[in-house]
Image (cartoon, rainbow, N blue to C red):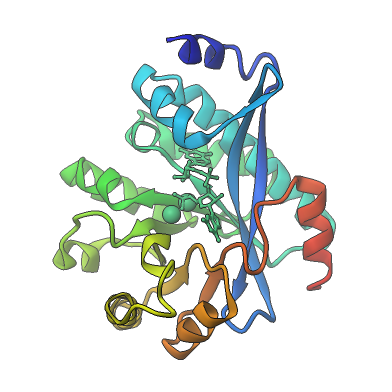
Amino acid sequence: VELARNLEHAIARDELTLVMQPQLSADGRRLIGGEALLRWQTNGKFVSPAEFIPVAEESGLILEIGDWVLDRACQMTAHYRELGLTDLVIAINISPRQFMQEGFVERVNQVLETYQLPPSSIELEITESTIMDNEDGGMKMLQELKQLGVSLAIDDFGTGYSSLSYLKQFPVDKLKIDRSFIQSIDVSTDDQAIVLSLCQLAKNLNLSVLAEGVESQPQLDVLAQFNCDAIQGYFFSKPLADSDFINFSLRYL
Ligand code: G
Ligand code: G
Ligand code: MN
Ligand code: NA
């Protein structure tokens, strides 16, 4: 309850920031973009999004916070483009309530216009359950967003329950394999089998595939062997403050 009350003032008190985690091609040579991740510092302490996002979702505050994230992430994307980082695609997490919010597509369109961004310069990350919990509404929303021209990724892929026949119909561009499958991929033959089949599934459906939470060279080696397209994780970089992300990115120009 106290958390919820503090969260109400987080935007007004300027306590929210976005950090950016680099995403690279699986060979590590190209920077393809970054994922914007929310951070909240209040009373001198960081509160984890794992803790406050569910509270925000529950209270409905997530709509206001989600709007702030969308705006700030697009502003950052525009800044990167001004610096010559025009190939980066910036991924933005979209919460379930935000996804089904009235006028969401129009909001996205508005923000893109405000910052004069090509729609393809941002990617919206949506979980399987966000889509599936909304049946037809979810599919319709995906189609409208796709029509707008933004990139669409399924986040935490493998942990949800979307059937493969649905997946085939989703107009999405990318699967992000959940880090729980990556954690032990260098030693677990079970996890290897799962991830290999997810990579093959993505290829067969013409989707790009990114592995989350890659922390070591042995994990990376397995993923490269599976023809995974892209990598995100501490092995390349933890989430970075805006200026650090810029310095990181400029090295790949
Ligand atoms: O960055 P970290 O690993 O602490 O994030 C924890 C969780 O919070 C992840 O599931 C992530 O998807 C979620 N999260 C981080 N930033 C945002 C955001 O801007 N919006 C939403 N809806 N979720 C976020
Ligand atoms: O649910 P989502 O995939 O959006 O959340 C991404 C979360 O994963 C972020 O909170 C981020 O800080 C975290 N993360 C990113 N890379 C790594 C990693 O290599 N290892 C671990 N343990 N967490 C990571
Ligand atoms: Mn994500
Ligand atoms: Na994820």
Q: Position of residue 232 (x, y in %)?
A: 56, 65
Q: Residue at x 42, y 59 (%)?
A: 153
Q: Quadrant of the N terminus?
A: top left
Q: Position of residue 149 (x, y in %)?
A: 48, 57
Residue 99: name its quadrant: top left
Q: Residue at x 28, y 81 (%)?
A: 193
Q: Quadrant of the C terminus?
A: bottom right
Q: Is residue 147 visible?
A: no
Q: Position of residue 40 (x, y in %)?
A: 62, 29
Q: Is residue 238 visible?
A: yes
Give the quarter the ligand 4 occupies. bottom left
Q: Position of residue 129 (x, y in %)?
A: 25, 47
Q: Residue at x 40, y 38 (%)?
A: 95
Q: Nearer the viewer, residue 181 or 32?
A: 181
* Lateral position of residue 151 relative to residue 203, left or right: right
Q: Residue at x 45, y 19 (%)?
A: 61
Does residue 167 sit above or below 48 in this rendering?
below
